[in-house]
Image (cartoon, rainbow, N blue to C red):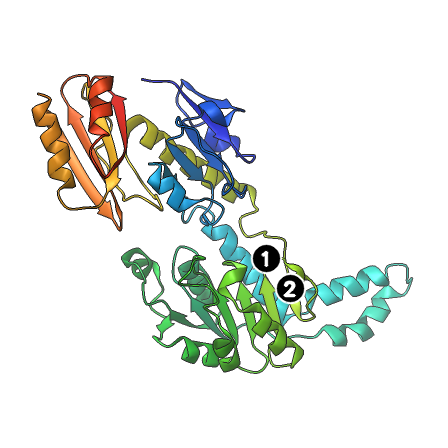
Amino acid sequence: MKDRKVYCLNAISAVGTDNFRTGYSLTDQLDDAAGVMVRSAKMHDMEFPPSLRAIARAGAGVNNIPLECCSEAGIVVFNTPGANANSVKELVLAGMLLASRDLLGGAAWVRENARDPAIAKSAEKAKKAFAGHEIAGKTLGVVGLGAIGWRVANAAIDLGMKVISYDPYMSLSSAWHLSPQVGNTSDLGELAAQSDFLTVHVPAGDKTSKMISADIIACMKPGATLLNFARDIVVDEEAVAASLQAGKLHKYVTDFANPLTANLPGAIVLPHLGASTEEAEDNCALMAAQQLQNYLDNGNITNSVNFPAIDLGVCETASRVCVLHRNEPNMLSQITGFFGKAGLNIENLANKSRGAYAVTLLDIDETMPHDTAERLGDIAGVLRVRRIEG
């Protein structure tokens, strides 16, 4: 089986990179890499070499990767949904506690009075300034029930909270995992109006930009807390600032520092710590490495954000051909017809589509010549052809 080189744009946990089979090696040159592993490094201004087949994001968000450019170049982009979900869930719970109990203020007071020999006695008088509220019995609104959202919802139920959710696109997997005690509403404004805490867990994109809008923020209870561990663009932070300054919102807890939130009274701003645990980094790296290797070695695709999932198992025939192409009429018949004209027998085939793009995997019983693969790539609508030898 062909040896392959992988380029890491960020420090990637060895739990992942050590998982590659013998023959894989890490390179410090992008020019000869078959795969890239990345966390948060920005890739929009990068030029990708012809050798690059796939990019594996060790994390969920892919806004640092130029997806359209990759799709048109036949570069499969993977992410690792759920690998860091528990880490983020725990931070959301911590965020609720930081907002409801003035733990940060209390800790700061102790540091400021550390030299007071009577600090224990002074603390008994000072602690009234840091009194807060319990979260048990309060209502948590959860926007988005993906891998993180349903975990947050279930954990809040276990902590004695009432939980209401909003997700018009909830997956079957999330529905199976979700506690039956979690309520649901189809009206985001109604959810905001009922919530003492509102937490958002949706992917960043055009459809979710400022999803928590000024109108939604205006619906929130006086004294409520808004938590954002998704991305800063999903919340209208100008409206958040106005609500905090007016004294309506109690706290805004976010994992995304920017010049507005970092200087905003009433905001608890963390330096993007959601997935910053050893366990999450290990889980993400391992999943990313496994998905990358399975694609490079077998053409199988799992958790891609720009091409459909497809799986023909381990390649055991003389050759496997992976064709990345546009999802257009007559593409499959052109591809299979090409093999017939070339006198190549197709032993097994899978074809999947997703939006504008599709993938066809074909197992053939003899080695496919290089020039035959190149001619297959001449079919209009074919973006990339890969020969995989068994």
The disc placed on residue 304 is none
Could you say where residue 6 lies in the image, as x and y percent from the top left? 45, 27
Where, quadrant-wise, is the C terminus in this rendering?
Answer: top left
In the figure, 49 relative to 97: above or below? above
Find residue 121 and report its image quarter.
bottom right
The residue indicated by pointer 1 is 256
Q: Residues within 10 Å of mark 2 (few under 14, many from 20)?
A: many
In the figure, 231 relative to 323: above or below? below
Which amino acid type is marked by label 1?
Phe
Could you say where residue 294 lies in the image, as x and y percent from the top left? 33, 31
Residue visible at 53% across and 48% down? 275
Which amino acid type is marked by label 2?
Thr
The residue indicated by pointer 2 is 261
Find residue 66 and report its image quarter.
top left
Left-right relation of 150 to 10: left
Q: Let me know if residue 195 appears in the view.
A: no
